[in-house]
Image (cartoon, rainbow, N blue to C red):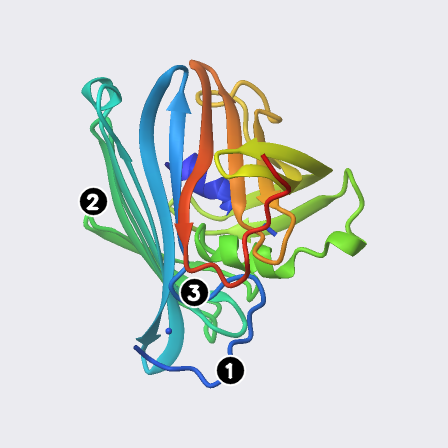
């Protein structure tokens, strides 16, 4: 689930009970909900959802994004996954305020929360499982794994990004420190989906090869080339096989979902 969210995560690229007089964002809105079906070989391995709604945090209007992933059916017999990620991020600019990572992946568990303090330029990271905490310095452009999804959807400039150019972003979503995330823009591509053919922008998130991924270029992401910038498909070549995630359902998009045809 972590690697899936990094894409959306990442994907991802680049919708409020508390009413806002002006919506400053162009690609998403309060109430947006996305559902993905993950395939491992011939198995429908699991489902993941990503949603965002308005909230108030420490007296400020904010967004509350939730990413959840769970194995289902036959796949859950071999490897049970129950992952929940939550991010509260400010409206303008998009910047994380509070983050939660609570996962159980085949018995590997982690329960982390992060308080971001941009006035002090520091983040307090608490590991609830180990009952420990520490603070690390941060800069004002850092994102967590969920806020990065919405930030990149808003900020990606197709007209001024050349094919082969990298989009770089620092993320903090764990007690392992800041993650240097890079996304390579591959250009335009039409993807056949359950909804029909969708014009997309293709990206290659650069990941570390090793225990999980076969190589640095093991991931490919497709994002709708419309006003929504919704992640459509993710494919990953893993050391133990390949996995694909496809958009399966959606609601609450800010703009019409553009389909070219069957």
Vertical relation: 79 (above or below) 223: above
**CB under 8 Å between callouts 3 and 2?**
no
Image-based side of 204 in relation to 158, left or right: left
- Viewer-proximal residue among 158 and 57: 158
**Front tag of 1 and 2:** 1
The answer to which of marks 1 and 2 sits earlier in the sequence is 1
Image quarter (top left, top right, bottom left or bottom right) of the C terminus: top right
Residue 51: x and y in percent read 37, 55
Image-based side of 197 in relation to 96, left or right: right
Q: Within 10 angstroms of label 1, few (less than 14), some, or many (20 or more) residues?
A: few
Spatial distance from mark 3 to mark 2, Cα to Cα?
35 Å
Residue 55: x and y in percent read 33, 72
Residue 121: x and y in percent read 49, 68
Spatial distance from mark 1 to mark 2, Cα to Cα?
42 Å
| x 53%, y 34%: residue | 193
| x 38%, y 46%: residue | 174
The answer to which of marks 3 and 2 sits earlier in the sequence is 3
- Viewer-proximal residue among 192 and 229: 192
Residue 67: x and y in percent read 35, 49
Residue 206 seen by the camera: no
The numbered dot on residue 15 is 3
Q: Which residue is mark 2?
A: 130
For residue 259, which quarter of the picture? Answer: top right
Image-based side of 173 in relation to 200, left or right: left
The answer to which of marks 3 and 1 sits earlier in the sequence is 3
**Front tag of 3 and 2:** 3
- Viewer-proximal residue among 89 and 110: 89
Q: Which residue is mark 1?
A: 22
- Viewer-proximal residue among 6 and 142: 6
For residue 59, which quarter of the picture? Answer: bottom left
């Amino acid at each position: 689930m972590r690697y899936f969210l990094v894409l959306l995560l990442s994907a991802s690229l680049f919708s409020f009970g508390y009413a806002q007089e002006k919506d400053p964002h162009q690609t998403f809105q309060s109430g947006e909900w996305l559902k993905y079906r993950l395939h491992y070989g011939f198995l429908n391995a699991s489902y993941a959802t990503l949603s965002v709604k308005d909230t108030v945090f420490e007296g400020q209007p904010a967004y509350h994004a939730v990413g959840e992933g769970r194995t289902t059916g036959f796949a859950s017999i071999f490897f049970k996954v129950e992952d929940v990620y939550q991010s509260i991020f400010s409206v303008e600019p998009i910047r994380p305020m509070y983050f939660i990572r609570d996962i159980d992946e085949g018995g590997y568990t982690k329960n982390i929360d992060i308080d971001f303090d941009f006035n002090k330029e520091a983040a307090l990271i608490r590991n609830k499982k180990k009952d420990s905490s520490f603070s690390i310095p941060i800069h004002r452009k850092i994102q967590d794994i969920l806020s990065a999804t919405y930030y990149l959807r808003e900020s990606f400039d197709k007209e001024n990004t050349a094919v082969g150019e990298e989009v770089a972003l620092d993320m903090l979503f764990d007690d392992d420190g800041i993650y240097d995330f890079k996304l390579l823009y591959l250009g335009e591509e039409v993807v056949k989906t359950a909804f029909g053919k969708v014009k997309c922008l293709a990206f290659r998130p650069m990941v570390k090869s090793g225990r999980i991924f076969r190589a640095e270029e093991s991931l490919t992401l497709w994002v709708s080339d419309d006003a929504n910038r919704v992640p459509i498909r993710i494919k990953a070549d893993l050391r133990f096989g390949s996995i694909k995630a496809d958009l399966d359902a959606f609601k609450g998009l800010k703009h019409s979902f553009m389909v070219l045809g069957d």
